Image (cartoon, rainbow, N blue to C red):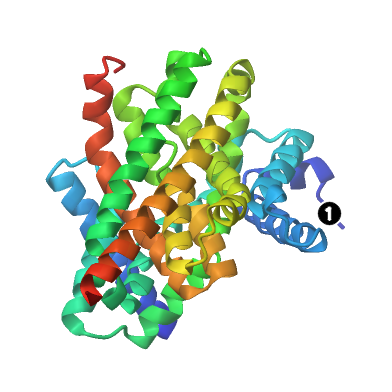
Amino acid sequence: MPLILGMSMLLACQMLGELLARGLAVPIPGPVLGMVILLVALLVRGKVPDSLRTSGEGLLRYLTLLFVPAGVGVMVHGALIGRDILPILLTLVVSTALTLGVTAWVLSRLQGRLGKGGRG
Amino acid sequence: MNVARLDQLWVYLSGNPLLSLLLTLGAFALAVRINKALGGTPLLHPVMLSIVLLIGSLLLLDMDYATYFEGAQFIHFLLGPATVALAIPLYDHRERVRRLLVPLVLACVTGIVTAVASTLGLALVLGARHETLMSLAPRSVTSPIAMGIAEQIGGIPSLAAGLVLLTGAIGCALGPVIFRLLRIQDPAIQGFAMGLSAHGFGTAQAFARLGAVAGAFSGLAMGITGLLTAFLLPPLVHLLGLG
């Protein structure tokens, strides 16, 4: 039963999220709104039910597997990717490196400064 | 005795979700084994390896992607509840998140601007086509969000999903190198940067390699980045006159 209960909670939040996204016509995916809804519910309730933890953490452990079916879809775009392969690869590598570096650097600088400000 | 002919069995199997599901799980299990045997190198990410194995098998079996996806969609569907489940680690680390909220949001905005500006700038300079450009633009957000954004700004949703995955794998490979270069050791900061730049892949790697704190911050980064990008990118593209 815990698996079923936990899964139902996750699906219910996702459904609420989807309905909200459609109802308000916002371009945010339902599951992301569902995540916000679940977070608010957990904050209100003050603890994570065991059943939810069982199914939720089980899903997160295998998160990478869930990307595989969509990823296989690149086979449909072989031709387009082939024509633009050089700009695509260069852009992805350089831009991802920059993003990683800038984000980590900014966060570590801000965290250090705020930490010192709090103590001083 | 009436024994069915092999080709009749094949007709049954190829139109049944069982085969796609089994192929997907088998390819993933094999890819994880291969990756482990090679010392867990992030250069051959199990997901990229599974995708290559699966594309190879589909070509061999002469099965098209639409037929494959009819079965594999049951796995794909679980991405939704898994995204919702990211609220759990976030809740577990709520105190730390609350304390760091301002730096986190600021780092997030800086990261998104860096990602989008460098992607569009580089792809334009290197001469990518318009559809490619618009499919590349949302590449630093998790695939379900990226597909929605790509559609809005004139890209190809499924191509965007593929590029997102490629970005994730590249981020996983580059992350450890960049953190060593910048001497960043805090797992929370590493996780946040991974989630922002390599979304789902980065989050999965953060959980597996760096621990629950890094995983929570990675999930947080992925969530905020998705929300902010969905609001910021379409107007930005129109502003730049690219839409």
- Residue furthest to the left: A24
Kind of residue indicated by mark 1: Asn
Report helix, strand or loop for mark 1: loop
Q: Quadrant of the C terminus of chain B?
A: top left
- Residue furthest to the right: B1
Seen at 81% across and 58% down, the residue is B38
Location of residue B190 in the rendering, given as x and y in whole percent from the top left corner? 48, 60
Can residue B11 be seen from the camera position used here?
Answer: no
In this view, B139 is above or below B78? above
Q: Tell me if A28 is positioned left or right of B36 in this view.
A: left
- Viewer-proximal residue among B166 and B76: B166
Which image quadrant is residue B238 in? top left
Location of residue B176 in the rendering, given as x and y in whole percent from the top left corner? 60, 55
In this view, B17 is above or below B39? above
- Viewer-proximal residue among B226 and A17: B226
The answer for which chain carries disc 1 is B
Q: Tell me if B176 is positioned left or right of A16 in this view.
A: right
Location of residue B94 in the rendering, given as x and y in whole percent from the top left corner? 28, 75
Can residue B96 be seen from the camera position used here?
Answer: yes
Location of residue B1 in the rendering, given as x and y in whole percent from the top left corner? 87, 58
Seen at 34% across and 41% down, the residue is B112
Q: How many marks?
A: 1
Crowdedness near tag 1: few (<14), some (14–19) or many (≥20) residues, C-alpha within 10 Å: few
- In the picture of the structure, the residue carrying the numbered disc 1 is B2
In this view, B140 is above or below A30? above
Seen at 40% across and 44% down, the residue is B141
Q: Tell me if A51 is positioned left or right of B49 in this view.
A: left
